[in-house]
Image (spheres, rainbow, N blue to C red):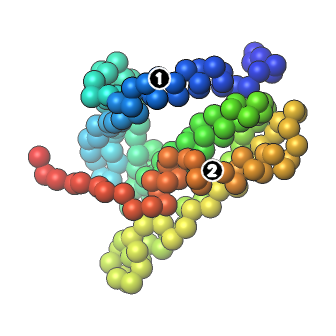
Amino acid sequence: MKDNSKPYLDIDKVSETIDAVKKNRGLAKVTFCMHGKSAGGVALESETGAITQNGVADDTRRGQFKLISDEPVPLLGTDLGVSPAEYALKSLASCYTVTLTSMAAAKGIQLDEIEMDLYFDVDLSGFLGIDSSVRNGAQGIRVDVRLKSENTDSEALKILVDSLPSHSPLHDTLANPVSITTRMV
């Protein structure tokens, strides 16, 4: 049973992390890794790899979490798992949750509930080579956020939600160009 007398995230831990990174900026440099292998058709089996922080690899997460992605049958898949678009939405929702929880804790706001509905709007005529003027990726991503807090008014909660685009690392990654290096090894 959760303790409703404190924010879900310990603000002291947030402060300790911030202080540690201020003292050693190398701790801010983190690389996440995933390993993927085809599972037949368009399906992919993935697992977590090492996480590297400050140039030091931590192998304890290697293989700890396994994921499978596929596409629904109408989109050439066999529906063995979540689609890549759904994983993108899951990633954004997860990052929003971390961001909201951290920002709320820093402001002394207890979030009793976080719920989101996310939508990935795509026109497949670009990906399928039917129309070269249509981009292959999403034309838009929409997120509806609902927050509940017994100790905070709706205006303060709205400020948290409005702050997501400028604070969420995944929002930033999806909304702005990022260098992606793809190579044959």
Position of 50 with respect to 73 (left or right) is left
* Residue in the image at 48% along x and 74% along y: 123
On the image, the x and y values in percent for residue 174 come to 47, 57
Figure quadrant of residue 12: top right
109 lies above or below 164:
above
Q: Secondary structure at mark 1?
A: helix
On the image, the x and y values in percent for residue 105 come to 70, 30
98 lies above or below 178:
above
Q: Which amino acid type corresponds to the residue marked 1 in the rendered image? A: Ala
Decide which of tag 1 and tag 2 comes sooner along the chain: 1
Q: Secondary structure at mark 2?
A: helix
Figure quadrant of residue 152: top right
Q: Is residue 135 visible?
A: yes
Disc 1: which residue: 20
User: For this rendering, which residue is in front, 14 or 4?
Assistant: 14
User: For this rendering, which residue is in front, 81 or 49?
Assistant: 49
Can you name the residue that lies furthest to the left here?
185
